[in-house]
Image (cartoon, helix red, strand yellow):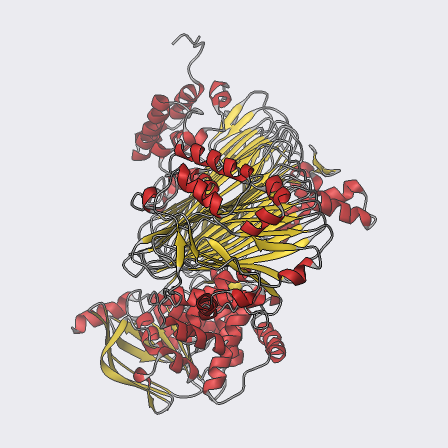
Amino acid sequence: MSTEVDQLEQLANQEYKYGFVSDIAADSVPKGLNEDVIRLISQKKNEPEFLLEWRLKAYRHWLTMKEPNWANIKYPPIDYQNIVYYSAPKKKNGPNSLDEIDPAILEMYNKLGIPLEEQQVLAGVAVDAVLDSVSVATTFKEKLSELGIIFMSFSEAVQHHPDLVRKYLGSVVPSTDNFFAALNSAVFSDGSFAYIPKGVRCPMELSTYFRINAANTGQFERTLIIADEGSYVSYLEGCTAPMRDENQLHAAVVELIALDNAQIKYATVQNWYPGDKNGKGGIYNFVTKRGLCAGIDSKISWTQVETGSAITWKYPSCVLKGDNSVGEFHSVAMTNNHQQADTGTKMIHIGKNTKSTIISKGISAGVSQNSYRGQVKVLKNATNARNFSQCDSLLIGDKCGAHTFPYIEVKNSTGKVEHEATTSKIGDDQIFYCNQRGISTEDAVSMIVNGFCKEVLAELPMEFAVEAQKLLGVSLEGSVG
Amino acid sequence: MSVNIKEKIWYLANFEVFEKKLNGGARTPLHQLRKAALQHVKKNGFPSIREEEWRFTNVSSIESTNFKPVDKKEQEEIDRNTLQEYLFEDLTPNRLVFVNGRFSSQLSSLSGLAKNIKFENLALELKNNPDVLLPYLAKQADYKKHAFIALNTAFLSEGTFIYIPNNIIVDAPLYILYISRDVGESFVTHPRNLYVVGSNTQVKIIENYVGFGEEKYFTNPVSEIILNENAIVDHYKIQQENKSAYHIAVTQVHQKKDSNYRSNSFSFGSVLARNDLNTVLDGEGAECTLNGLYMANGKQHVDNHTLIDHAKPHCNSHELYKGILDDRARAVFSGKIYVRPDAQKTDAIQSNQNMLLSDDAIVDTKPQLEIFADDVRCTHGGTVGQLDDEGVFYLRSRGISKQYARNIMVQAFAGQVTHKIKLEGLREKMEGLVFSRLRDGHLSDK
Amino acid sequence: MMLEIKNLHASVEGTEILKGIDLKVNAGEVHAIMGPNGSGKSTLAHVLAGREEYKVTKGSVIYEGKDLLKMTPEDRAREGVFLAFQYPVEIPGVNSAYFLRTALNAVRQYNGLDDISAFEFLKLAREKMKLIDMDESFLKRSVNEGFSGGEKKRNEILQMAFLEPKLAILDETDSGLDIDALKIVAHGVNRLRNKNNAVIAVTHYQRLLNYIVPDYVHVLYKGRIVKSGGKELALELEEQGYDSIKNDVEKKS
């Protein structure tokens, strides 16, 4: 308890600590978006023809689409012609081993606390490091390949496993799915790819660490994870970006596919630069994440701790197609200062006896706005579908807002859908109550916030749970007093 | 209108009969109130399903049935054996009994109540001591807001008046039994109850509405309950009218500082039942607990509307309503929690849970929160589900028959409400009522 | 002497509520503070516990030879001042066991004792919960969350049993309690009493004092103690209400 509080105290005095810029020579395409830029990206990546066609189709569809405006967020119009869609650190010829990586990059990752040298990395975690538009390193690749596990950057996967990519790319999130997914499909530059073969239980956490470094650059990565029959994988992603005055766009797509009896756990600790205290700068985080429980008895669970970004717009979802499949969503979204978050999930019950659980914890401080938006849909043939949703909001101060928008649609009478919602506030009186029992103010705040989130934090792997707790402390800086 | 009006609308005709018998009573201010209430019903008619509050409950059949007032002075003797199980003599020696809306001194029993406690027929008190009750009467239940309050107010006469001064703990419950029995034609009664509970005083009140026979009748009770500072009231309302009867009831509660109102509402009978239960938490530290259980099968329709008005800070409310439905029965639950701008530190929990035992049963549940304060904790939830097959299977795997396993599961579901009955003897009675209704995991008629 | 309040004045948002309170409390004593609504009873309780919204403008409070008003709220608690709140606060997500253990260890550390182990804590919890007739499932529930008014008040006394304060201030712990719950709460308080600790019971009603019998009764009205006496004063107040006292005061002024 007391060590935890010490950490909180230290952290409470810190600013966003990942806000530095590294001087890394970049190879970028010119600003703006047109078919030539897409061809250029595809060419730089030496992509097969089908992928270029897929991108162009997405782009042409994107041109016909309108930016969505139903979310509870406000921002000035984004100028899509003022964004650099591809920026890669200059390199000799693609690092074949970690020794060949630019030392400046290694140093940057060290500074972020993500050492890429295998002897130093967190035990039991394999990392794919994505910097701006490309993957710069993937650790433990060989060790994993002994088990038949494919874990590499998306670009490499396109080269080495084009059939798998072709089969699954866009199978969960079609290129025409929504405005930001279509944009991503047209210009995505890199990301992570994982395939777990039949019956294999992946022995270590797979992890991608996303970093935006270059200015005026959007990050459009794409992650695709396929868990074949009877396999298991736990996957983590983390994100940071430098402090810059202008807003930067991050529009990612994540697709998960779980076949019969397979299980995927996907955890995110999102700490993009949130902008300064006055709301200047910060990342616009428009992300489409969706998992398909394609097989019987499959399971996909999303866990997210969202503390960063000026704007968060994401709804990690599960399509429960296989009979008896299970979808879970555990989320902590914390907003402070001028941050805005509109996040939640969709659970689509298609198969029989499908189950879903939604636990959402929203914490709002400062003048931020935090919305939960969730949909539970039970289709006609989904007999015995079960859903439990719990959405709790914690307000700190009286200038922030918490909003809950649950949508429930049940088309099968055997369905059982439960929804619970609470809104509460950390107030002076709670702090005083704890004080009166001998507990200091710092202990009281950390106790209340961690108590509020504990069901979600418990879903994270150990090291990341600690990291997430720290992040929550930092993000709360200056909001209680 | 093209409707063929053969005779006067029944309540207007009834009112003429009622008014004639009042003699001098017709000149009092109270009678002006009755007439105003009647005018209100006459002008506005009964609510239609186009009104949001009545969207799922159609009362047109009540309006179109020719309900007669009960005219006979003395009813024939009721079989004492039939009656016995409803007298609750094991629970309390204090009871008022009404038969078809008329007070029966013969069946009532009052013993051992302190002199300063009033527990009387309202009509009698209106005649003998109007000064005590008039300051409270019709102050909570506003006839302009509800057609059936208006209808009741127009015929305001018999019912129960309870008045308990400050600083008293009333040990034995006060029991009120409203019996309806066949008289060969459809009739209507309008019981009116007024309970005034003093500061720092505690009392338990049981209202039981029982129907003998099979004929159609209509019970239209209105209760007003006033809790002064630190008053504690346990209020039990049991509705077991016959299966042809209509029961439309309104309970309006007003709570002052630190008072605690605990309601337990059981709705078992009637072809169409509607309960409106509204409480205003109008003083800091006031608390209310509303528990409800409804069971319906055949073509029964049961509608519970509750409104908890958090008007002051630091008030708590807890609400749990559970329903068990079978055959083609339909249930409506509408629970509103209203938190006014001043009502900071409100803590409100509301839950409505329904169990469907057939494919044709319907539930419309509408838990609502309207919050105008910013420092509150409000939780609400609604569930509609079926008997848990896994639970049944588990019991069967331990050797329990399927039918019995289903009964156990249904009873366990109801048990979460019946367990909250603090009065032990009454809890057993209610558990017995639930159990006697179960056949092979379905609801049956006795 | 355990507690000596001298000429205590306090105000909330610029309005003076306490206008010169004098009160002496010795170890082993029970003092009841009664008075009509708005007389300043709860303010006095909160000032003693250190609530910041209440500004002390004049006077002193010496507790166990130390200046109580100079201490932070948590240090007062660690020194053995316990306030049973009139409106105990809910803390969602923080389970009661964790909360109690954190509080208990904070107090123990302050007094130079080792933290209590999880095992010892559970043993202690079982013992204390029996005292107040509480079910063990209580420990797993979030602090005061979803508790009925009566449960919240009982939880306050449970915390008191854990922290074993020297000076317990019960702020309207009886309001809203039915007779059964009142007896349980009073029984718990009585079991915790000994010659080394003291109780200040703030109440609006006399009934609590049937069960927690006071040595002294003080009547607070308009921010001053206008009458003090033995336990018979409480009975007198119940019979006559506060009006006669109000009238006496109005006449004098």
Residue C97 left/right relative to A178:
right
**What is the residue that sits farthest to the right in this orientation?**
B399
Total number of numbered discs in the rendering: 0
Image position, residue A286 (x, y; %)? 42, 47
Q: Nearer the viewer, residue C134 or B171?
A: C134
Image position, residue B240 (x, y; %)? 60, 36
Q: Nearer the viewer, residue A395 or B337?
A: A395
| Above or below: residue A287 compared with residue A469 | above
Q: Is residue B260 visible?
A: no
Residue A62 left/right relative to B361:
left
Q: Nearer the viewer, residue B272 or A80?
A: A80
Q: Residue at x 53, y 76 (%)?
A: C101
Q: Is residue B118 visible?
A: yes
Which of the image's four quarters has the C terminus of chain B?
top right
Residue A266 left/right relative to A280:
right
Image position, residue B101 (x, y; %)? 51, 32
Q: Residue at x 55, y 41 (%)?
A: A48
| Above or below: residue B45 compared with residue A279 | above
Which of the image's four quarters has the N terminus of chain B?
top left
Q: Nearer the viewer, residue B310 or C116?
A: C116
Q: Residue at x 48, y 25 (%)?
A: B59
| Above or below: residue A20 compared with residue A287 | below
**What is the residue that sits farthest to the front in this orientation?**
A92
Image position, residue C171 (x, y; %)? 39, 71
